Image (cartoon, rainbow, N blue to C red):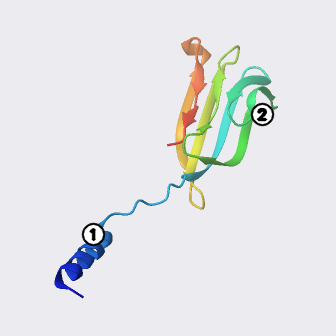
Amino acid sequence: MAPQRLLATLALVLTQLTTPVAAPAQASVYKSFTTFSWSGKPCVTVESPVIGNTTVCSRDGFFQINETIVQAGQWIGVRIPLDGQTHVECAAWLGPAGGLQSMYAHDSADSSLGAGEADCLRQVP
């Protein structure tokens, strides 16, 4: 092989070896669950991307939205207007699939402080 051709081939191989290759795009996958509680009325109206805008009733004023698998960009959690309740509270938990979850959002509202809402709606990073 001629020296010039050998140098050109070597330069091409070195360029290919040192050129960064982009990793394939992969969505981050997480596990999430949401808990919320209220006191005052037996039922509470909630807004949730998982269970929709609905009314939830419970004798003990507690509800859990079971664990779901979510991806980056999706919304999790719940928003609860005070709306006649004496107290509302929520927590959204998030963690990697196959790992531990930690509290990602927490909020509360109390009628003694006036009107308000507990807002734990968050977008997964």
Mark 1–mark 2 Cα distance, whole angstroms, equals 67 Å
Position of 93 compared to 3: left or right? right
The picture places residue 2, in percent across and down from the top left corner, at: 20, 85
Q: How many C-alpha atoms fall within 10 Å of the one at disc 1: few (<14), some, or many (≥20)?
A: few
> Which numbered tag is attached to residue 123?
none
Q: Nearer the viewer, residue 74 or 61?
A: 74
Q: Is residue 97 above or below residue 47?
A: below
Residue 115 versus residue 1 in the image, above or below: above
Mark 2, residues whose alpha carbon is within 10 Å: few (<14), some, or many (≥20)?
few
Q: Amino acid at mark 2?
A: Asp
67 and 39: which is toward the camera: 67
Residue sitting at x 44%, y 60%: 23
* Front in this rendered view, residue 3 or 106: 3
Kindly identify which residue carries mark 2. 60
Q: Is residue 26 above or below residue 77?
A: below
Which image quadrant is residue 109 in?
Answer: top right
Above or below for 116 versus 3: above
Q: Which residue is mark 1?
A: 15
Q: Is residue 115 left or right of residue 1?
A: right
Number of numbered discs on residues: 2
Which quadrant is the N terminus positioned in?
A: bottom left
Q: Residue at x 66, y 39 (%)?
A: 35
Lower position in the chain sequence, tag 1 or tag 2? 1
Q: Furthest residue to the front? A: 2
Extreme residue in the top direction: 114
Task: Between label 1 and label 2, give the one nearer the viewer.
Answer: 1
**Which residue in the rendered view is the most extreme toward the left?**
3
